Image (spheres, rainbow, N blue to C red):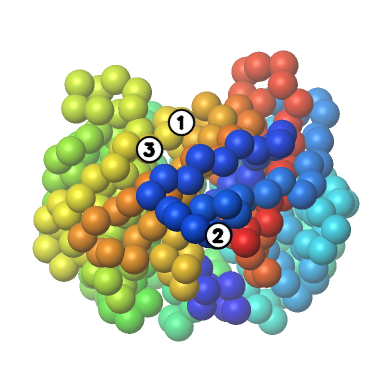
Amino acid sequence: MKIQKRLAGLLVLSSSAAIYTVAGVTGARAQAPAMKLVQTIELPGYTGDFDHFAVDEQRGRLLLAAEDHATMEVFDLKTGRHLKTVKGFDAPHSILVRPAASTIIVTDSGKTMTKVLDAETYAIKGTIKLTEGADSAAYDPETNIYYIVTGGKDVDMKTANVEAVNPDTGQRLGGVTFKDDHVEAIALEQHGNRIFVNLTQTNKMAVVDRKTMKEIAEWPVAPAQQNAMVALDEAQHRLYVVCRADLSGAPAGKVVVMNSDDGKVVSTQDAPTRVDQVIYDIVMHRLYVPGGQGYTEIYDTSDANNLKSVAKVSTAPGAKTGILLPGKNLVLAASPGETKAVAKVMYFSIP
């Protein structure tokens, strides 16, 4: 995909007249805002959380999984205008759009299973029957295999899985099971065969050979707990792992940088809390970590051994998922959660 060549992950947007704090940057660069809010689309009547975005460049659409609203929201990619609400889900999470494919896959953690949609009309054409709890996912375009996290405590299971699926046929090609009831985000190598899997319950990073679908290593994420998000920089051999709790288990954000060859911790930085996505721009060496308490922190990754925070951008409460679009625009989804706040999708330009 055109987008995948530029990005290693996704990010989220926020609202209001963002405040910028740039640390350790001097000269003209320090004067420029890290992100500038250019548009806010309000979605009245929504409650709960949003999950992940996906881009359909072919049709000029931006798609958003409204997890707790049980819908997929469709926006115009150029104007940001809200176009359509697609129903028929239990709890949608991740969305797969493939170039030239006639279908879109939406993982659904409910009993009605993962959905196969017509890419033009969004009509549900079928389901992919996996273990309940389908949530996070990652796609390998070279082999046309979709890797989906399933199971776990949310569906009353003491184990969780990563299941390999052919998105054209829905055929299950294999899987690996973990003795962990809480598995979060995964990352795939593009020039290797490994999958990196956040074992959140046991505070480890699992490494899976995706040719054999066998676990080959488990690395402790020692500096923090509740490791949930991960971005991979293959060129620098680094995993950027975002955790939600400190060593006592209290809510606290932390980015843990690990060597992707051996799992050794290289550096750490404090991070926002209530994070649900990490977005990585490999070209610009920027890591975006959106926090639900109302700001996104931006890190410079150009020195592989020293992660550096360079900006904290005020966004909106609940703005904890997002995506980096072609043309250097960042979009965040602000979830209202259990509050009376108005849900919104916010578009930021990045200099």
Instruction: Give 32 or 15, whichever is nearer the viewer.
Output: 32
Residue depicted at x 68% and y 69%: 327
Q: Secondary structure at mark 3?
A: strand
Q: Is residue 237 left or right of residue 96?
A: left
What's the amino acid at mark 2? Answer: Ala
Task: Where is residue 243? Give x, y as percent.
Answer: 32, 38
Q: Residue 342 got which mark?
A: none
Q: Is residue 26 visible?
A: yes
Which label sits on residue 28? 2
| Quadrant in which residue 128 is drawn | bottom right
- Name the mark nearer the viewer: 2 or 1: 2
Residue 107 appearing in the image: no
Query: Disc 3 or disc 1, which is closer to the eye?
Result: 3
Screen quadrant of the N terminus: bottom right
**Residue drawn at the location 51% of the way across and 77% of the way down:** 5
Please state if 151 lies on the left or on the right of 65 as rendered.
Answer: left
